[in-house]
Image: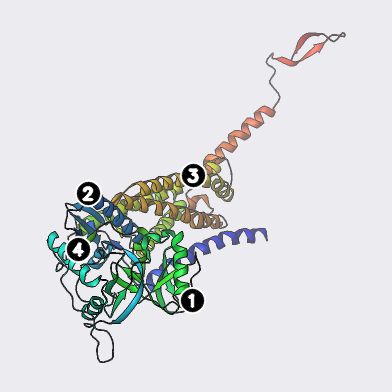
Amino acid sequence: MASSSQRRIPLRVLSAFFVLFALCYTLVFFTGDRGTTPRLGVDLQGGTRVVLTAITPDGSRPSEEALSQAQQIIGTRIDGLGVAGSEVLVDGDSLVITVPGQDGAQARTLGTTARMFVRPVLDAQIASDAEFDEAGELLEPEETPTSALASDPDEAAELIEEARAFRQSDDPETQARAIAEHTCQGLDPLAGNDLPDRPLVTCSTDGVMVYLLGPVLLEGEDIDSGSVSDGFNQQQSRWEVSFRFRGEASQTWATFTRQSIGQQSAFVLDTAVVSAPVIRDPTPAGSATSISGNFTQDEARDLANQLRYGALPLSFESSQAQTVSATLGIASLQAGLIAGAIGMLAVLAYSLVYYRLLGIVAALSLGFAGMLVYGILVLLGRYINFTLDLAAIAGFIIGIGMTADSFIVFFERIKDEMREGRSFRSAVERGWQRARRTIMTGNAVSFLAAAILYLLAVGQVKGFAFALGLTTVLDLLVVFLFTYPVLSLATKSKWLSNPKLNGLGAITEVARERAELAARAAKAEAQPRGNTGEISAEAEMSPDGSQVKGTQS
């Protein structure tokens, strides 16, 4: 019964490993876009570049401090999206954003000012330029050139002043004319430049509605950034962004909702109404508030990211997205993969020659570790936009090498125990008890180094650190849930425990010779000493108890 129970424990642990492995590849093949290749970085597949030109309301040059702050905020947005391999550079009065892939919209989204205001809705009507098909569905507006706003700072400042005079007037007649005449197609010169203490005529993000809004009630800075989250509302079947206001703003929002039952409030992002819900119930101070609209999952995530990391200190005009060619290309990717494959094959060949059965276990462990790394890479690219660049490949190769180090520590402990004369079964159990602490300590040091490097580094070094940390965690997973249980099960087999087959014959022979030498030494000590005139250790005693002489044998 005890043997059966001991056999079940490794089987259960091994079963847990295969469940995790199957779950990983189930997610790969049956969720998301079901793609089976990782996302590649700019250096391997190229990317998209967008130039953001700073626009100030008075047409003056932006300060270096404001540009640097904008660069940092966009960098934190990129980190929040998990878009590895992206770059944000200051170039004169502009910011240059480069992201992997061909999605120029994502790069432009990163550069939006993201000024969030909450304004009361005073009036609303369908936009005069909104177009619908015969079924009543909204037609997509025609694309307008992104450079159509103004390339000259003085001209841009003039457009902003004209828009403020017409769309932010306190005169009721001007407001009525603005809401009737304002069109929702094309770029908005007031995006990120509207005055908070004035009324505003603006459009919804889909271009269907035109709103007359009152002065700002609350700002995005009043939002508790730690409370921002996006998710899918199962009851309403739509994506939403939730957050809480902090401090006095929370009480202001509670008072407003209590006094405005049945009225609309507008959540305005860069002068566009993201959501204009009707207030049905008051929101208690400190409670969460949700913004819901016709969001896709990506749009909800982008909005949450913008609210979480704050607004840019400047408004920007984005250029047309430009395709950037790969700096290294597929040849470099293939060279890196070939180098990694050669290194792994060399390790496997050496392990098989030197360890035999243990080498086969090492080969299986490395194979499963490599497949787990690949599957997780696909999932990370799909769900958090992690991109695989050459630095990350280097991190994975080094990490897999460290996994091989863990096997060697374990196997050498087994050999040490067998040299002491223990059986294969006993050596595996005692060797594991001694090796696992060393393995955990080594991996903890590696993970700590990777974590510090990830927190302090930027750019591709960050990708290297992430890859190294991930493979360190997978090393522990594979060694604890696969390598040790497989060897533990192997000890239960008479065939696999045969020293001639498992590669431990030489160690067994050394243990046998040591045992013979120890037996001979013990036998020699037990035999009586020879009659060679040696003085006995015993001494004869005189009648009074004093020692007088030793006796000869």
Looking at the image, which is closer to me, 461 or 195? 195
Residue type beneath disc 1: Asp
Q: Give whichever of discs 1 and 4 has the lower sequence position.
A: 1
Per the image, label 2 sits on a secondary structure element best described as: helix
From the image, tell me which residue sits under label 2. Answer: 64
Up the image or down, 469 lies above or below 134; here it is above
Judged left or right of residue 473, residue 169 is left
Per the image, label 3 sits on a secondary structure element best described as: helix
From the image, tell me which residue sits under label 3. Answer: 441
Q: Quadrant of residue 200?
A: bottom left
Query: Given this view, does label 1 or label 4 mark the residue nearer the observer?
Result: 1
Real-space CA distance between mark 1 and mark 3, rounded to the nearest whole angstrom: 55 Å
Residue type beneath disc 2: Glu
x and y, in percent, of residue 243 in the image? 43, 65
Q: Are marks 4 and 2 in contact (CB under 8 Å)?
A: no
Residue type beneath disc 4: Glu
Real-space CA distance between mark 3 and mark 4, rounded to the nearest whole angstrom: 52 Å
